[in-house]
Image: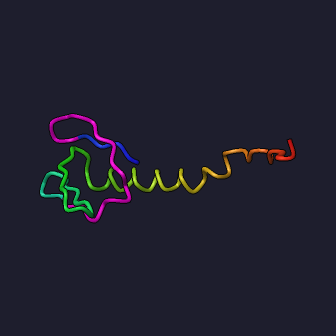
Amino acid sequence: MIQVTRINHLPLVLNADLIEHMESTPDTVISLTNGQKLVVLESVEEVVKRVIDFRRFIHTMPQAIPHAAPQNTNG
């Protein structure tokens, strides 16, 4: 999930996996896989950076979460 700002200055948290493509016309238009289009204040480059940062975070997360000890099911 990434945070972007709609053209009316309201924040929006967006599932980055739903981004199909983006255009700079001159506003940034994000087209989603469901056909919805969002116009945001951030540049295309900034949205790409946020998606990359989010994916890096996701890929490093399992190393940061300690594994839980196995539970004893013998009662």
Task: State the residue at coordinates (84%, 45%).
Answer: 72
Please tell me which residue is depicted at 60% across the width and 53% down the height of the picture.
60
Coordinates of residue 2 in the picture (x, y in percent): 38, 46
Q: Tell me the residue at 25%/60% (across/down).
A: 32
* Residue 31: x %, y % from top left: 22, 60
Instruction: State the residue at coordinates (31%, 55%).
Output: 45
Please check the rendered image and state whether residue 17 is part of the magenta-colored stretch, yes or no.
Answer: yes
67 sits to left or right of 41: right
- Total numbered labels: 0
In this rendering, is residue 54 above or below 9? below
Residue 16 relative to residue 55: left or right: left
Of all residues, the one furthest to the left in this rendering is 25
Q: Quadrant of the C terminus?
A: top right
Residue 70, given in percent of the width and then of the height, sits at 80, 48
Among the 4 quarters of the image, the one containing residue 7: top left
Look at the image and give the residue range highlighted in magenta: 6-23
**Residue 46 versus residue 70: which sits nearer the camera?**
70
Is 52 or 14 nearer to us in this picture? 14
- 45 part of magenta stretch: no
x, y percent for residue 24: 18, 58
Horizontal side, residue 40 vs residue 74: left or right:
left
35 or 63: which is nearer to us? Answer: 35
